[in-house]
Image (cartoon, rainbow, N blue to C red):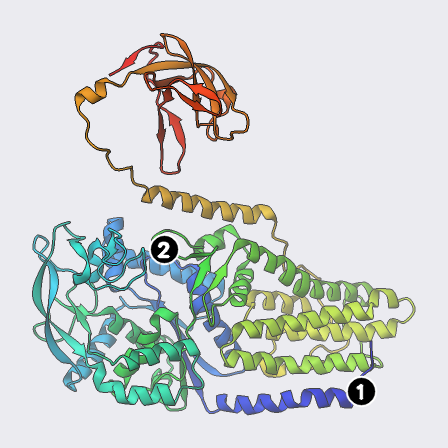
Amino acid sequence: MPSISLFQIISIFAPLFLIYPLFMSDQSNFKRYTVTSALPYANGPIHIGHLAGVYVPADIYVRYLRSKGEDVLFIGGSDEHGVPITIRARKEGLASQQVVDKYHEMIKKSFEELGISFDVYSRTSAPIHHETASAFFRKLYEQGEFIEKYSDQYFDEEAKHFLADRYITGTCPKCGFEKAYGDQCESCGSSLSPTELINPKSALSGNTPVLKETKHWFLPLDKHEGWLREWILESHKDDWKTNVYGQCKSWLDGGLQPRAVTRDLDWGVKVPVEGAEDKVLYVWFDAPIGYISASREWSLKTGKDWEPYWKSADSKLVHFIGKDNIVFHCIIFPAMLKAEGTYILPDNVPANEFLNLENDKISTSRNWAVWLHEYLEELPGKQDVLRYVLAANAPETKDNDFTWKDFQLKNNSELLAIFGNFVNRTMVLTHKYFEGKVPAVGEMDDYDKQVIAEIGRYPGSIALSIENYRFREALGELMNLARLGNKYLTDTEPWKNFPANPARVATNLNIALQICANLTVLCEPFLPFTATKLANMLNIKQFKWGEAGNANLLAAGHLLNAPALLFEKIEDTVIEAQVKKLLDTKKANEASQWKPMPQKPTITFDDFTKLDLRIGTIVAAEKVAKADKLLRLTVDTGLDSRTVVSGIAAHYSAEDIIGRKVTILINLAPRSLKGIESQGMILMAENSEGKLCFVEPSEPFGSGSEIR
């Protein structure tokens, strides 16, 4: 390869080293970081859409900050109030508390097994949350931050209960779907209000609800519009993601309206004012306060003061959410915090778009998802593969897609063939030629120096991407470091050079091992299990981020542990099983949506008596030439033996149906099909999948028996 001088290398990469500290100076203004992740509803398990949109990016960010030595509080927890919980409870025949207990534990365990490194994982049904949320509401109430309004809301007279949006179903006025909810049609995706539904019904009793007046408290968002417009549209125009900024601008340009903070429900945080005994805090108001109550819980367990993380100007608050929560975290929750008066506002809200599955929208109601707890059971030991694929496919700027074939490709062709292959080659060669000890560096040529200079730029370039919330880009840079190592080994060919020049090979393998050591540091935010495994192989402690970027992490003579494979090949059978599982789900969904054909026009008894239906026996069958769907049947009707052409070849083979009893209409006018005169019609039943089956007698009736 062409030679390059050290001066040229410095000239090329010096600007990068200059840019990185300037960028990083913005981070050094903060003494601590408060990082929240959206609270998942405890009405079902976690799926890959949740992970790609929120939890994997948040964990990458937090692990990176910790590696830098920053003071970080990473908050998670279960959102356990709201209508979805009560609906799930009704569906499963459980109390609401039983439902949230079940799914909270399932979600928490799944997060732990995937390596999502929360400092606290709390829940909104906890007493400390009820206390915190009540106190927050009470303070705003006493400060006069709410307005009281009366409005008409649907009421179930039999159940004696006001109905939340999801407890009202009816026909969508936009697409005609008959099972739309009072807030959304899951068929066409339109947002709705309960009064828009055609033929509304109560999910509690099935009766038609009536409109009844009720009182609620509202947060007057219009009062906060001025400072919100300045704070978002001017202060964060350049540093918030375009999808976040755009959605906020759309809301602000449309004019903010007062929003209810209470609801007529019996499950949730009770409204702590007189005259509201039958009301709870609206879940959108209650849930984000869960970040604060979780911080208080963490404080009680650790003895650390939670308030600086929420109330000091030198703390940075970052919310990781999906795009469906942008307005709540960028407009409504900041308005709540500002109204309360003692809290900092979020510095950034890096919301992601949605992840689809096999080119179809992930849907919990249709069971169209890859559930985390099932993945962990069915693909044990592959936590980092899932983290890698979801980070590589993160829907950062637009919706993205997860497919099992891509999952397999990324494991086999990237993690295994690039990252794992480089580490394994390096470790095996070191054990082969130097008894598993790090060889000393000898004389370096220009290529060696170029590679060392390249190593030096990766901590800065990866950090730059992470701190700009570009995690796909950061992961790509990490893999480029592994590619650099692979290329270096391929170019220097130590396996060929050792007999003639062992000193040269010692230098090559020392540099390759230094790349491995750097990978342990730089991959840890993305692949924590792999980082631990690699550090154990190298027989080292886990270095901090600031120690990476140099070629002196491993001292000459350091003894390595035995090599082991970081990743395993994923075989086709594993992927085929997962794809089949999804196809079975799709078939089940289609079957559940199937409806029988509507009744045909009414006929008279005299019309029916004109039909001559008999039991017949198929005595011969063969395929019709040049007709994939047709079989030529010879049927014994008891009266005669006749030819019938039937379109059942896609469902039955000719040899398998000889001797079958069938129902045949024998007085149908003959019809020519493919040049064959068909003298009757075989009756078939058709199911939701379009599969046909014979209509046969349940007892051994003879051919010619009449059906009447």
Residue at (43%, 62%) from the top-left corner?
A: 49
> How many numbered callouts?
2
Q: Nearer the viewer, residue 641 or 327?
A: 641
Along the horizontal axis of the image, is 218 left or right of 30? left
Most extreme residue toward the right is 500
As helix, strand or loop, the secondary structure at mark 2 comes to loop
Which amino acid lies under the numbered mark 1 shown in the image of this protein?
Ser
Quadrant position of residue 129: bottom left
Circle 1 — which element? loop
* Circle number at residue 364: 2
For image coordinates 45% across by 89% down, the residue present is 30
Q: Is residue 367 positioned above or below 422 on the image?
A: above
What's the residue at 78%, 64% (across, down)? Answer: 429
Quadrant assignment, res 38: bottom left
Q: Residues within 10 Å of mark 2 (few under 14, many from 20)?
A: some
Is tag 2's residue or tag 1's residue first in the polypeptide sequence? 1
In the image, residue 282 lies at what x, y percent? Answer: 21, 70
The answer, for residue 540, to whether it is visible in the render is: no
- Can you say which quadrant of the picture contains the C terminus? top left
Q: Position of residue 532 (x, y in %)?
A: 59, 67
Dividing the image into 4 quarters, which one contains the N terminus?
bottom right
Question: 590 above or below 64?
Answer: above
Residue in front for this viewpoint, 95 or 434: 95
Disc marking residue 131 = none
Q: Residue 5, which numbered label?
A: 1
Query: Along the horizontal axis of the image, is 694 left or right of 428?
Result: left
Q: CA distance from mark 2 to mark 1?
A: 58 Å
Tell which of 177 and 300 is nearer to you. Answer: 177
Residue 334 in the image, given as x and y percentages of width and height: 30, 82
* Amino acid of disc 2: Thr
